[in-house]
């Protein structure tokens, strides 16, 4: 039986005893207020004087009321005390378990802000197996969070430390205010210069400021939402296919990025010579070169160099095989 159910039963039992005692004393000729007063002082064993003189019938009724009432009140008190202690113990144990889980994470993504944007980011990231840690000021809002979380202000360095920023792979600043996101970017960049940081902005005028503060990517949800809607109007099938491949999970094919490692046996070889398609089954769609430009539909004589990023499509197994080939 749950604690809430026991609390309801205990409360109902106390009310029933008080009601029965009040009605009983009224039957003996007490007024309603006097009857209620006599019942409460009896079941709580306060021991004040009797409101009216007791005869043998009143005395026997009072003894029965004491036996039933005191037991009921003690049971209710025990249930309430148990609920308080259990709640505090569970809270402490839950907090310690979460702290242990946070300490064990490595290469995770820290999402600052558990609003609509933060929830969407967490849903898609967790869907591809990305470990998530959430930071938010509102403890009640975090109560429904299925990921490890830290209650606090993400602009505070100590809160970012508690979320494991020293071991994180990326930080997403997705709180409501642009100013807070700017502070998060500055703090995270100061704590981890090599950290990958994505920032949300509401005002287009703040996008250059976010980049100057250290954000690797700046995202305006309103503008992206408009662009997606336009894409559905102009190229609905292409837009839907990309949505399914990137986010839906109903297709086995995925888009992924794979870095060419310095020690890869394919370093210096061309795409034709490496035979990545035949070896892994994944299809290379584009190459991002060192200057940040993309070479889409790269020709077979494209030479692979360390640090380049290949954009590829394939199943999870094919993309894993491609990653191992280029590691």
Image: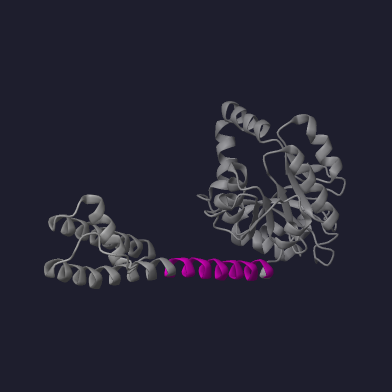
| Location of residue 243 (image quadrant) | top right
Residue at the outermost front position: 53
Residue 56 vertical placement versus 14 (above, below): below
- For residue 58, side relative to residue 253 (left or right): left
| Residue at image location 71% in from the left, 59% down from the top | 276
**Percent from the top left, x then y, of residue 319?**
65, 58
**Percent from the top left, x then y, of residue 186?**
82, 48
Asked whether the viewer can see residue 230, the reply is yes
**Percent from the top left, x then y, of residue 185?**
79, 47
Asked whether the viewer can see residue 299, the reply is no
Compare residues 254 and 219 and report the one nearer the observer.
219
Compare residues 121 and 242 and report the one nearer the observer.
121
- For residue 324, side relative to residue 149 (left or right): right
| Residue at image location 61% in from the left, 27% down from the top | 230
Does the magenta-highlighted stretch encompass residue 97?
Answer: yes
Colour convention: one colour
- The span picked out in magenta is 82-103
Compare residues 20 and 2 and report the one nearer the observer.
20
């Amino acid at each position: 039986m749950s604690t809430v159910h026991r609390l309801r039963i205990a409360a109902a039992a106390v009310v029933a005893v008080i009601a029965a005692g009040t009605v009983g004393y009224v039957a003996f000729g007490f007024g309603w207020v006097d009857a209620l007063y006599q019942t409460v002082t009896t079941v709580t064993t306060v021991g004040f004087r009797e409101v009216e003189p007791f005869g043998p019938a009143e005395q026997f009724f009072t003894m029965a009321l004491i036996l039933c009432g005191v037991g009921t009140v003690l049971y209710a008190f025990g249930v309430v005390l148990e609920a308080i202690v259990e709640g505090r113990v569970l809270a402490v144990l839950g907090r310690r378990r979460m702290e242990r889980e946070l300490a064990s994470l490595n290469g995770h993504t820290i999402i600052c802000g558990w609003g609509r944007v933060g929830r969407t980011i967490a849903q898609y990231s967790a869907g591809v197996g990305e470990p998530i840690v959430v930071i938010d000021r509102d403890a009640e809002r975090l109560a429904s969070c299925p990921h490890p979380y830290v209650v606090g202000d993400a602009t505070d360095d100590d809160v970012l430390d508690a979320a494991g920023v020293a071991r994180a792979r990326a930080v997403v600043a997705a709180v409501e205010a642009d100013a807070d996101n700017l502070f998060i970017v500055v703090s995270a960049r100061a704590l981890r210069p090599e950290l990958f940081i994505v920032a949300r902005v509401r005002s287009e005028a703040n996008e250059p400021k976010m980049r100057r503060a250290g954000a690797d990517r700046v995202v305006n949800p309103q503008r992206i939402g408009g662009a997606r809607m336009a894409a559905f109007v102009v190229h609905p099938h292409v837009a839907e296919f990309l949505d399914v491949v990137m986010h839906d999970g109903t297709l086995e094919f995925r888009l992924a990025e794979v870095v060419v490692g310095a020690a890869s046996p394919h370093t210096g070889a061309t795409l034709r010579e490496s035979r990545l398609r035949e070896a892994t089954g994944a299809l290379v769609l584009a190459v991002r070169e060192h200057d940040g430009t993309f070479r889409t539909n790269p020709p077979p004589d494209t030479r692979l160099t360390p640090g380049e990023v290949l954009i590829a499509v394939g199943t999870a197994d094919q993309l894993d095989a491609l990653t191992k080939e280029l590691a």
